[in-house]
Amino acid sequence: MPRYPQTERLLTDVRRVLRTRGYSVRTEQTYLRWIARFMGRSGHPHPSNLSKEHVEAFLSGLANEARVSPKTRNQAASALAFLYKEVLDSDAVGFVKRARGRSRVPTVLSHQEAHAVLAELSGRKYLVAALLYGTGMRVSEALSLRVKDVDFELARIVVREGKGGKDRVVMLPATLASDLARQVRQVKDQHEQDRARGGGWAPLPGALARKKPDEALTLAWQYLFPARKSTRDPVTKHPGRSPLHPSAVQRAVRAAVRRAGVLKPASCHTFRHSFATQMLRDGYDIRVVQELLGHRDVRTTMIYLHVADQAGPSVRSPLDREVSVRRRLPGLDSDEGA
C-alpha cells in the first residue's frame, strides 16, 4: 500500500491537537478514521490545497451511499469541521449543513426479553451485557472501566469520560456484585502473570502519565475487561492489555437475541434503551434517569418517557372498552365470506 507523507503528517497533527484538547480515545479514533478516508477520496492533496469543494464532494459521495445513515454523515462532517477549524485554521467548512435524521422510536426489550437474551450469554460477555441493562452504560463505557472504577463498598460504578467527556456515577447492581468481584480476581491473577513477563502496563490519562507513569503498572488502572492478548501501546510502546473489543460483545449479543427467539432488532445499545424505559416505568424521576444516562439535555431523555408512557398499560385501546353490541365472531354472521 503506497505511503502518503503529507497525509501521515496531517493525521499526526490531528492526533496531537485532539489530545491537547482532551478529546476521548474513541473520538480520536473516529476522527482519524474519517479524515484518513477523506484524504484518500480526495487524492491525498497537500493540506494547504484542501478546499470546501473537497468537503462537498466527499459528503455528497457519502449521501449517495445507501448504507450511510444521516447520523454517520454528520459524524464525518464533525470530523472534517474539526480538521479545517482546529488543525488547518480555516473557516472553509462553516457552510456545511448537517443531514436531517429520521425521528425513530428506540427499540426496547421488555424485562422478560432482556433476561431471555442475557440467559443466552456466558462469561465476560454476559457480565458486560448485564451491566448495560443493569446500569444504562454504553458498551464503550463498560469496556473502558478500570478495576478502580468499581466501588464495592459504596455499591457504585464510576463511568469515566463518557460521551461529552463527562464522568458520572451509576449503581452497582447487587445481583452482579459477586460476578464482578470474581472478574477482578481474574484480572489480578492475569496482571501478576503479565508483570512477571515484563508486561502489565495500562494506558494512563495525559497528566497522570507524565507525573506518575509507574501507576500504569498497578492493578487499579488495569481494564476490568481486558483483551485476551497483550499488545504494545501505540504511544508509549509498553506491553499491556487493551480492553475487550466492542465487536466481540456486539456479535455475542446479536447471536443471543436470535437464540432467545426475540424478533426485535436488538443490539448492545438496546439494553441502554431498555434500562431507561424500565426505570421510568418504575416511577423514577426523569432527572434521575438523565443523570444515570449521562444526557446533557433532559430533552434527550424525554424520548424514553414517551416510550414508557405511550406503550404502557395506562394507555388503553378504544377497542378494549366495554360495549353493549354483540362481538362479531367468524361463522356467526350470515354474510361471512361474502
Image (cartoon, grey):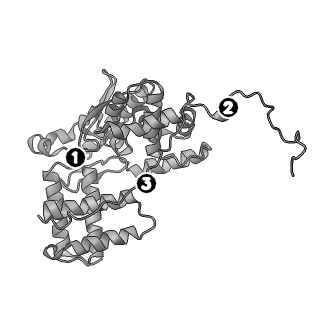
Which residue has dot 3 on it? 102
Residue 232 placement (x, y as % from top left): 25, 54
**Count of marks placed on residues:** 3
Q: What element carries label 3?
A: loop
Give the residue type that dot 1 points to: Pro
Give the residue type that dot 2 points to: Asp
**Residue at left offset 81%, top offset 32%:** 326
Q: Is residue 304 left or right of residue 264?
A: left
Residue 145 placement (x, y as % from top left): 31, 39
Q: Quadrant of residue 272?
A: top left
**Residue at left offset 45%, top offset 64%:** 67
Which residue has dot 2 on it? 320
Mark carried by residue 203: 1
Q: Is residue 91 above or below residue 49?
A: above
Residue 242 placement (x, y as % from top left): 30, 48
Q: Is mark 2 on a helix, strand or loop?
A: helix
**Is tag 3's residue or tag 1's residue first in the polypeptide sequence?**
3
Q: Which of 196 and 14 is in front in this view?
A: 14
Do the residues under discs 2 and 3 have CB atoms within 8 angstroms? no
What is the residue that sits farthest to the top in this orientation? 153
Q: Quadrant of residue 188?
A: top left
What is the residue that sits farthest to the left in this orientation? 211
**Residue at left offset 19%, top offset 42%:** 216
Q: Is residue 271 left or right of residue 162?
A: right
